């Protein structure tokens, strides 16, 4: 389950992700913040999250720092401040799906890969995001992320945040 940046920011972030992937020789992916990594019952999720999205207003998150790690899916990330709307949305999605929140570390991935520390540090210098900055969140998606090949991932459903 992903939280999606607003359309204009999503387009800018997609360009940033594509450029980093080109430089690293990896594959780009859709900009997102993972809310829940595993959805136990996708059909239940469609109903529950659809209702939740209709009642949740769009909100801003703060991107606070650029970090590189040796974790494939956190190769280069912008850390996200877990506060306000994001904290509520994560909690509400977990409740709606009947899952527990286990070590939620919100982040916006900018590059996936298994790269040496020196290469990650060099690539990090090419990130053009100004941090800290605010990013709007205006939708949630249910995505099939089975496997490591992001080209095979598929969006099953997307709901705009429509609450007041």
Image (cartoon, rainbow, N blue to C red):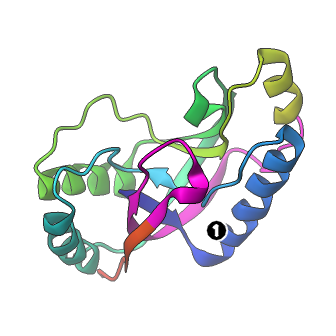
Tell me which residue sits at (66%, 69%) in the image: 9
Is residue 153 a member of the stretch shown in magenta?
yes
Horizontal relation, residue 2 to residue 20: left or right: left
Q: Is residue 72 above or below residue 16?
A: above
Residue positioned 43% across, 60% down in the render = 3
Res 93 quadrant in image: bottom left
* Image spot of residue 98 (x, y percent): 10, 49
For image coordinates 78% across by 50% down, the residue present is 129
Against 120, residue 51 (above or below) is below
Q: Quadrant of residue 161?
A: bottom left
At which x and y percent is residue 80? 53, 43
Camera-side residue of 143 and 85 = 143
Give the left or right position of residue 92, taking residue 21 as reference: left
Please state, as top left, top right, bottom left or bottom right, where the C terminus lies in the image. bottom left
Identify the magenta region: 125-154
Say which residue label 1 marks.
10
So how many labels did they put on this image?
Answer: 1
- Residue 10 lies, with reference to residue 150, above or below; the image says below
Residue 22 spot, x, y in % from top left: 86, 49
């Amino acid at each position: 389950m992903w939280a999606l940046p607003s359309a204009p920011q999503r387009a800018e972030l997609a360009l940033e992700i594509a450029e980093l992937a080109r430089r690293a020789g990896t594959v780009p992916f859709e900009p997102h913040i993972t809310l829940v990594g595993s959805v136990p019952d996708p059909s239940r999720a469609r109903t529950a999250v659809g209702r939740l999205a209709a009642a949740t207003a769009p909100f801003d998150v703060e991107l606070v720092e650029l970090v590189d790690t040796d974790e494939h899916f956190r190769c280069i990330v912008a850390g996200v401040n877990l506060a306000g709307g994001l904290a509520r949305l994560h909690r509400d999605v977990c409740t709606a799906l009947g899952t527990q929140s286990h070590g939620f570390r919100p982040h916006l991935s900018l590059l996936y890969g298994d790269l040496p520390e020196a290469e990650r540090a060099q690539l990090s210098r090419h990130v053009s995001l100004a941090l800290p900055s605010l990013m709007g969140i205006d939708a949630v998606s249910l995505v099939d992320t089975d496997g490591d090949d992001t080209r095979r991932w598929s969006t099953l459903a997307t709901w705009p945040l429509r609450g007041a």
